Amino acid sequence: MASITRITARRSLASRRAIALELPEFLLQALETRVADANAGGTPEDHVTIEHFIELGLAESVSLAEVALLEQRIPGIADAVAQWLDEMD
């Protein structure tokens, strides 16, 4: 009989996790320019960061139709996406 050596607890889909990225310099400078443009004239509490732009860019790559398909493999992802969208407002 096989034994279970590791049980991995499922992470909350609404939680956040930090990762490290290595990006080409041209891309970083393009993002920095977008951040500067977005923050020009805005109040400090409305300022965005490079992380905001990267998060939104990645989120745009996942369609609502794909979320519906992913729900079969990752139960609760649709609710997590809805919560994330609500928090973006």
Image: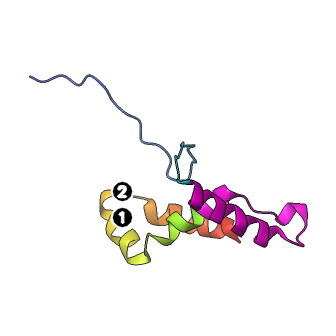
Say which amino acid is labelled 2.
Ile
The residue shown at (57%, 61%) is: 27
- Where does the magenta region start and end? 25-54
Task: Specify whether residue 37 is painted magenta.
Answer: yes
Q: How many marks?
A: 2
Residue 34: numbered disc: none
Placement of the N terminus among the 4 image quadrants: top left
In this picture the colour scheme is rainbow
Drawn side of residue 55 relative to residue 87, left or right: left
The quarter holding residue 8 reads: top left
Q: Determine crowd level at label 2: few under 14, some 14-19, many 20+ residues with C-alpha closer than 10 A.
A: few
Say which amino acid is labelled 1.
Glu
Q: Main secondary structure of the magenta part?
A: helix
Compared to residue 15, the image places residue 80 above or below, namely below
**Tag 1's secondary structure?**
helix
The quarter holding residue 47 reads: bottom right
Q: Which residue is mark 2?
A: 74
Residue 11: give x, y in percent of width and height.
47, 43
The residue shown at (51%, 64%) is: 58
Q: Are marks 1 and 2 in contact (CB under 8 Å)?
A: yes
Viewer-nearest residue: 43 or 77: 43
Residue 21: give x, y in percent of width and height.
53, 46
Residue 71: numbered disc: 1
Residue 70: give x, y in percent of width and height.
34, 64
Drawn side of residue 88 relative to residue 57, left or right: right
The residue shown at (50%, 47%) is: 12
Residue 45: give x, y in percent of width and height.
86, 61
